[in-house]
């Protein structure tokens, strides 16, 4: 991040007038600056979603609604300043909105063209110093049919934040339509107050016992492959787990007293062991980190990362393996700590093109995704996994009613689309066989999935 003379003068004016306040980085923000092999300013750190809106809208009402949300959520007024040791957050007391309107032609409204347009909007760079670190473009397909492309930098948002944004935006729009003046209710806890509480809690007495757990838990773990020194953005390939198989995975989890996440993770670890030939694999998984009710209405990057080590015993039955994976996962989650501090405790640092701890990301995206509707207006959020490129391979599973969407994220220098297609086939075959005969050994299930 660099600052021109004009920016310095503007910053000085903001600080002296009280228009802006500065705060230390939150722990999740430190993860981006300190442990990622991808520069913070890279577009790979942008998150994007599509909000499908049904109903007649006016630009004026939309702008008014956006302004209310910007006033409520301070991260939409947040940018970053260079600091002596690490950057600082700067929150302005007010800010203009970043909202554009575009009419689409029939060809542009087609799903594939719409996806390309969303990618183009999402990949435009943000000015980390000047801000804002989000943009919204309302695409009109018809007078009563709109798609809002909402892109935001990962440093100020996570997946949970997108659901909060939709709820706030819908509420603000209806407030304006009903003629209700004034602001939205204040959030119970602002993002910078949440970050301050986290810094106060994570003192050495809390960090060191957990650091000792991770030094022991990850001792001797190995990396899966040698990365490219000049990594490109991740590519995305999407598939679906059909509802029948999804129901089978849920039932397998129930029978073993495990969670849906643990059942999917067991199948994924088993598939990776077969695919790579390695039986000892570490994956990273995100955690919402929003256990307290006071932060559930707050937009911001609150989520953390937990490494999960899977050591596959091929002679063990799947049902026993699932129970073991579930217990390992519970233990790991109970020892979760800020990832930047975990990396420091391990004595690791990111190398060019390499994550500090793991090569593979596995996630079950089950945070609240609201669908809001009234007789004359409705909004539906669709998460669009853009894959922040801090790993080499990612498997992100999103619940879609009874079925699941799988977004495979991969580095094209390491894997071809044909290899990812085969990996997806193996994963679904492994889940199918495990659900049918959970008493069979892992080795037999692997052979059946080939």
Image: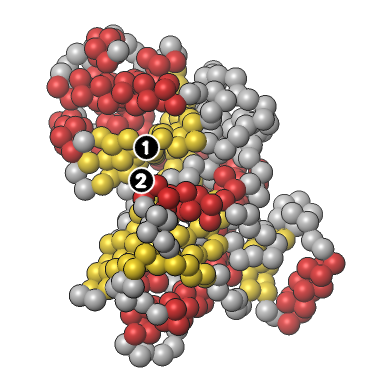
Image quadrant assignment for residue 192:
bottom right
Q: Which residue is mark 1?
A: 238
Q: Which residue is mark 2?
A: 365
Above or below: residue 386 compared with residue 350: below
Q: Nearer the viewer, residue 57 or 316?
A: 57
Above or below: residue 446 compared with residue 93: above
The residue at the point 64 percent across, 36 percent down is 37
Assign the N terminus to one quadrant of the image. Answer: bottom right
List x then y, in percent, for residue 248: 16, 32
Image quadrant assignment for residue 364:
top left
Residue 190 visible? no
Assign the C terminus to one quadrant of the image. Answer: top left
Judged from this view, the residue extending furthest toward the right is 5
Q: Nearer the viewer, residue 275 or 327?
A: 275
Above or below: residue 400 compared with residue 74: above
Q: Is residue 324 left or right of residue 284?
A: left
Q: Is residue 367 left or right of residue 439?
A: right
Badge 2 or badge 1: first in the primary sequence: 1
Q: Is residue 443 left or right of residue 86?
A: left
List x then y, in percent, for residue 302: 49, 54
List x then y, in percent, for residue 194: 51, 62
Disc 1: CA contacts within 10 A as few (<14), some (14-19) or many (>=20)? some
The residue at the point 37 percent across, 14 percent down is 274
- Per the image, label 1 sits on a secondary structure element best described as strand
């Amino acid at each position: 991040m660099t600052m021109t003379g004009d920016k310095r003068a503007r910053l000085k004016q903001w600080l002296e007038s009280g228009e802006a306040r500065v705060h230390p980085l939150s722990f999740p923000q430190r993860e981006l600056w300190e442990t990622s092999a991808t520069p913070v300013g890279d577009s790979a750190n942008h998150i994007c979603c599509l909000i499908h809106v049904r109903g007649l809208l006016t630009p004026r009402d939309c702008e008014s609604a956006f302004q209310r949300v910007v006033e409520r959520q301070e991260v939409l007024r947040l940018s970053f300043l260079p600091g002596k040791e690490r950057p600082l957050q700067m929150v302005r007391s007010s800010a203009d909105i970043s909202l554009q309107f575009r009419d689409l032609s029939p060809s542009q409204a087609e799903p594939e063209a719409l996806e390309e347009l969303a990618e183009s909007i999402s990949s435009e760079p943000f000015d980390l110093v000047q801000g804002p670190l989000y943009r919204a473009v309302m695409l009109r397909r018809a007078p009563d049919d709109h798609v809002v492309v909402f892109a935001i930098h990962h440093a100020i948002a996570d997946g949970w934040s997108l659901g909060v944004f939709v709820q706030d935006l819908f509420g603000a729009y209806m407030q304006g339509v009903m003629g209700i003046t004034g602001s939205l209710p204040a959030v119970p806890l602002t993002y910078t107050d949440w970050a301050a509480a986290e810094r106060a809690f994570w003192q050495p007495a809390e960090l060191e016992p957990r650091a000792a757990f991770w030094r022991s838990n990850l001792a001797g773990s190995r990396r899966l492959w040698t990365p490219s020194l000049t990594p490109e953005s991740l590519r995305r390939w999407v598939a679906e787990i059909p509802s029948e198989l999804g129901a089978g995975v849920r039932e397998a989890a129930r029978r073993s007293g495990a969670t849906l996440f643990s059942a999917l993770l067991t199948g994924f670890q088993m598939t990776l062991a077969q695919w790579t030939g390695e039986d000892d694999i570490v994956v990273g998984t995100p955690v919402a980190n929003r256990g307290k009710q006071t932060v559930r209405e707050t937009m911001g990057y609150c989520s953390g990362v937990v490494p999960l080590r899977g050591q596959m015993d091929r002679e063990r039955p799947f049902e026993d393996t699932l129970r073991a994976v579930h217990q390992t996962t519970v233990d790991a989650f109970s020892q979760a700590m800020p990832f930047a501090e975990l990396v420091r405790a391990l004595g690791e640092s990111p190398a060019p093109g390499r994550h500090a701890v793991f090569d593979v990301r596995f996630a079950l995206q089950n945070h609240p995704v609201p669908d809001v509707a009234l007789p004359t207006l409705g909004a539906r959020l669709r998460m669009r996994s853009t894959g922040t490129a801090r790993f080499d391979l990612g498997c992100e599973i999103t619940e879609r009613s009874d079925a699941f969407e799988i977004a495979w994220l991969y580095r094209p220098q390491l894997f071809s689309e044909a290899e990812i297609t085969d990996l997806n086939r193996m994963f679904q075959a492994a889940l199918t066989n495990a659900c049918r005969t959970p008493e069979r050994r892992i080795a037999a299930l692997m052979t059946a999935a080939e």
